[in-house]
Image: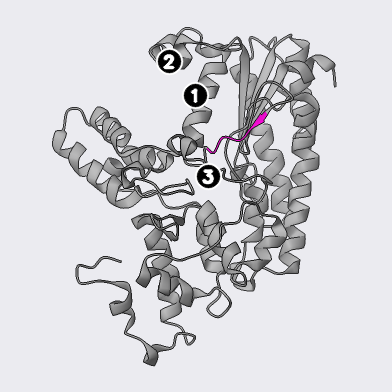
Amino acid sequence: MPSVLAQECYLLTRQYTLSTSRNTTTNSDTRSSGRVSLESRLFLTCSVHTTTFIHDLFGPLYIGKHPTPWHNKHMVMKFDLSFIDVSSWDMLNMGFNDYINSVIENFVVKYQRELGFPEIGNVINTQNATSSLNKIIALVGSRNHTLFVGVDEYDAPANNSMFIDTAIGLGEVTFKKVTEVDQFFKSKFFAVLKMGVIPAFRTGISPLHATDMISGHRRLHGICGFTESEVRAIVQHYFHEDELEADSTAYALRMLYNGYYFANSEYDESTLLYNPHQVFHFISNSQANGVVSKLPANSTHILKAIPDIGEFSAADLVDLMIHRSIESTVKDGFGYADLLGVGKDKDITCSLLLHLGVLTRSTTGNLRIANETAKTEVLERTSSYLRSDAFPAPLIKPPGDILYGKDGDV
């Protein structure tokens, strides 16, 4: 790989922020909540195609008044690995080749002028997406251009392979498959990027990949999501011609999505945060078809993997619903082997539920269910338990009395 590529290409993944100095690493607890907004701003700032309207987007903001030397200097290519099916090895190979090649093909079409109008067939190898990736990186370098690569949901294939069939539980066979899927992407995808791309900026957190997890620093809490006032401003801007609709939307958002807090110290309730992706998804879809954004699939998979009987079981989820919080030590990092402890180890299970957005911190330092959206998912899991033979029905109140208060609140 020509050295010019190693000097002039940049990689964005969901892990941590790495300063442009190779000797300095800074963890920025952005969480997945704020990742989408941050990535979008980076892509718009970097792209050579946004030069004419970049001032309209960021002019009044700090980044608009203090642009970096590399603004509007790069071609931008983004991957989202959650689109790749890992249900079987055949589906994985086919999905990997099809998806990676489709992203590269769209990139070639978008930047055909900068790339010298190449023939698609000279870049795309339909049977080997790794070869296609090598070719496009080399082509960008040969045209004296720079490349900014974004990799979203980089841990999704390995995570999803763990929960293809939660009914069989999380055992050694599952762990072996997850390791193999992880190695597949390391060798066929990330190895190519590491050869031709400098990791210049990474954002986001994966509890199963990162060795350093949530910092817990209160000063970083504000960048993890939207505050109440920010959501209100967004809603008022979107529904500026309908104040009644703005009020009802803001209320619905507050009921469904507000409640996240990530700092590990005492805090003011007014600083609770919203997941930006859920906010925008709700606003853009609620009028059309009433779609409500749910928790990520990995979150619900973890809930389904919690057994009816165990060290931490569905019975503990029922207790959580009743008492509204649970005491647990939060783990700072995970390996795939730790997933074997789901349902067997309370701290591992609760920590994963925290990092996946089902739980969040409470004013007492305990963990609580984050919001109504998360409560719905927990309720679904506990309801199946309460209807099962494992539930000691004669010992406690009927399921309806346990889960619902006088006003119907969970």
Residue indicated by mark 2: 58
Decide which of tag 3 and tag 2 comes sooner along the chain: 2
Q: Amino acid at mark 1?
A: Arg
Residue indicated by mark 3: 216
Would residue 110 be found to the left or right of residue 193 on screen?
left
Q: Amino acid at mark 2?
A: Phe
Image position, residue 260 (x, y; %): 41, 48
Would residue 67 be found to the left or right of residue 282 on screen?
right
Up-down relation of residue 142 to residue 262 (above or below)? above
Q: Quadrant of the image for the N terminus?
A: top right
Up-down relation of residue 145 to residue 386 (above or below)? above
Q: CA distance from mark 2 to mark 1?
A: 9 Å
Mark 3 or 1, which is nearer the eye?
A: 3
Taken as a whole, is the magenta stretch helix, strand or loop?
A: loop
Assign a secondary structure to mark 3. Answer: loop
Magenta segment: 25-29
Assign a secondary structure to mark 2. Answer: helix
61, 1: nearer the viewer: 61
Decide which of tag 3 and tag 1 comes sooner along the chain: 1
Look at 37% across and 62% down and name the residue there: 376
Residue 28 falls inside the magenta stretch: yes
Residue 362 lies in what quarter of the image? bottom left
Q: Are marks 2 and 1 in contact (CB under 8 Å)?
A: yes
